């Protein structure tokens, strides 16, 4: 009889919380605490700081040592900074067009007191900057103290630190899932960096049939080929949306490493509450994974997680954050896919999308390893396209980041798993083909960095001014970034803002006088 598949249910998830898990939790949580202290009334800030501090102090892992050697730690940090060089946070390389808006958010956090409210002079209305600010808050505080340019550099370093933590967690997952394999970390990290769907194939087909050449996506990218939805490859995520990628990847890797440990589940709500302030849709899928992990451990572990004081404190901390992020959100476009788009075309696109993005990885991986998290990731990725939320369909683009991260890690483990029979050797060959195609597609996505010149961030444009002048001005409603002010629910606990005047349309000076994306 052939050897059984590598059982990741036994190899992964059982590690005890340690200093690394605490550092990741602190990294995710710090922006939420800064927000409550800076945007909330004095009493709300004090309560938020107390709840977060006590929850972190009660979290397990304080007596455990640092799991990596100092050389491995420094290597991961340096590689994280190098990886962050592909992001647009610092404008040292080309920054994707989304950074027009993100730069404006950082400007508003750096330029004046918090909370941030803009008063539009053409009609006298006030609008609260209401967005997931987790990624920006530490850099915004640095900007208030040292200026916008220093804040931009800090944001690049902050991104590098987060990616360094991702690599540290991947190192520990590799040690647990492929023990004794010298190149385990290199394989998992390398695949994680370039992971994505096989978008290069439909792009070549569409561009070829359109007569523009099969390699037209060089310098353009092309993960939006289905038009209804996309699953962001990891190169795309770092280049365009590190603010959403980090709060998806870090919780996903924490749960892969610790999700079967009852002690970790008694504090799991704390990193999830922090992640929700970075990217609520990503955090929601991570919370679903955490809930399933607790259910699998049985009633004692589930009861311990539900009754845990750190989890309750984290829930209390998350309450004002959630009230802030849902203010005015009813105006964000949403609905079921088959109600929003023509059903026949939507179903056909959905099926092809899943084949190119999910099943090509999940099926051969399932032939090589056993893992309930693989089933979770594949099922969720198959279901998410059924609902549309946000102007760029955040339900797939953001909600898919957690299960995609899990799929990337498990596919990497599957590449290193034994393949003693023909079927599993075939599965490994399919995975190697997917790696080659994904790497080629990632090169197409990353080609923006070598085909486009860097452009400097605006030094003076607020969010409303940048939104009016951005490349998305004619195509995007900004309900996912702003809400009417005053809001009675938020006024009950938020500090008193000083409205910032915004000139009428056509009066503001150009935001990007030295060129833009």
Image: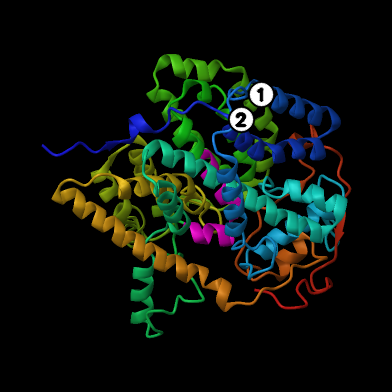
- Report the residue at 58% width, 45% height from top: 71
- Report the residue at 66% width, 63% height from top: 99
Q: Which mark is residue 270?
A: 2
Q: Which residues are magenta?
A: 232-252
Q: How is the image coloured?
A: rainbow
| Residue placed most toward the observer, 114 or 106 | 106
In the rendered structure, does residue 250 fall within the stretch colored magenta?
yes
- Report the residue at 33% width, 81% height from top: 209
Q: Write down the residue under mark 1.
A: 55
- Contact (CB < 8 A) between labels 2 and 1? yes
In percent of width and height, residue 132 lies at: 66, 46
In percent of width and height, residue 483 lies at: 71, 49
Q: Is residue 150 left or right of residue 228?
A: right
- Report the residue at 71% width, 78% height from top: 515
Q: Answer above or below: position of 47 versus 173.
A: above
Based on the displayed image, in which of its 4 quarters is residue 465 positioned? bottom right
Most common SS among magenta residues: helix
Q: Secondary structure at mark 1?
A: helix
Crowding around mark 1 (Cα neighbors within 10 Å: few <14, some 14 to 19, many 20+) is many
**Where's the N terminus, which quadrant?**
top left
Q: Answer above or below: position of 256 versus 350.
A: above
**Where's the C terminus, which quadrant?**
bottom right
What is the C-alpha distance between the residues marked 2 and 1? 7 Å
| Residue placed most toward the observer, 512 or 138 | 138
In percent of width and height, residue 287 lies at: 51, 34
In percent of width and height, residue 95 lies at: 64, 67
């Amino acid at each position: 009889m052939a050897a059984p598949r590598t059982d990741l249910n036994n190899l992964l998830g059982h590690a005890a919380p340690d200093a690394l898990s605490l550092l990741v939790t602190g990294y995710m949580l710090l922006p939420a605490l800064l927000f409550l202290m800076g945007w909330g009334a004095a009493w709300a800030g004090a309560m938020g700081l107390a709840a977060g501090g006590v929850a972190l102090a009660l979290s397990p892992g304080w007596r455990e040592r640092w799991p990596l050697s100092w050389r491995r730690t420094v290597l991961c940090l340096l590689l994280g900074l190098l990886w962050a060089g592909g992001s647009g946070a610092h404008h040292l390389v080309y920054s994707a067009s989304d950074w027009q808006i993100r730069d404006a958010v950082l400007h508003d956090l750096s330029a004046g007191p918090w909370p941030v409210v803009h008063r539009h002079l053409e009609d006298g209305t006030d609008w609260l900057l209401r967005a997931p600010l987790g990624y920006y808050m530490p850099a915004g505080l640095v900007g208030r103290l040292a200026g916008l340019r220093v804040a931009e550099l800090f944001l690049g370093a902050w991104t590098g630190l987060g990616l360094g933590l991702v690599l540290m967690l991947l190192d520990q997952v590799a040690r647990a899932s492929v023990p004794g394999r010298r190149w385990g970390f290199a394989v998992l990290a390398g695949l994680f960096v370039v992971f994505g769907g096989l978008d290069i194939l439909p792009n070549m087909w569409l561009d070829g049939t359109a007569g523009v050449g099969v390699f037209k996506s060089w310098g353009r990218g092309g993960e939006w080929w289905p038009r209804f939805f996309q699953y962001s490859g990891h190169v795309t995520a770092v280049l365009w949306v590190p603010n959403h990628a980090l709060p998806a990847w870090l919780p996903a890797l924490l749960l892969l490493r610790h999700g079967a440990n009852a002690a970790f589940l008694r504090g799991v709500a704390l990193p999830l509450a922090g992640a929700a302030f970075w990217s609520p849709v990503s955090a929601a899928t991570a919370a679903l994974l955490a809930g399933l992990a607790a259910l699998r451990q049985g009633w004692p572990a589930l009861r311990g997680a539900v009754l845990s004081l750190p989890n309750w404190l984290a829930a209390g901390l998350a309450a004002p954050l959630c009230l802030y992020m849902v203010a005015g959100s009813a105006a964000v476009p949403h609905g079921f896919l088959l109600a929003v788009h023509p059903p026949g075309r939507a179903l056909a696109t959905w099926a092809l999308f899943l084949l190119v993005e999910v099943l090509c990885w999940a099926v051969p991986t399932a032939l090589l390893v056993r893992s309930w998290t693989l089933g979770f990731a594949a099922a969720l990725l198959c279901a998410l396209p059924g609902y549309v939320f946000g102007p760029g369909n955040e339900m797939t683009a953001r909600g898919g980041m957690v299960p995609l991260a899990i799929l990337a890690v498990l596919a990497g483990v599957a590449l290193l798993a034994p393949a003693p029979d023909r079927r599993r050797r075939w599965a490994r060959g399919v995975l190697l083909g997917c790696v080659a195609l994904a790497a080629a597609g990632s090169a197409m996505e990353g080609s923006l960095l070598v085909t486009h010149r860097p452009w400097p961030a605006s030094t003076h444009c607020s969010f409303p001014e940048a939104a009016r002048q951005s490349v998305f001005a004619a195509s995007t409603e900004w309900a996912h970034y702003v809400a009417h002010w005053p809001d009675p629910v938020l006024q009950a606990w938020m500090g008193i803002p000083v409205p910032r005047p915004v000139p009428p349309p056509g009066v503001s000076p150009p935001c990007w006088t030295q060129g833009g994306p």
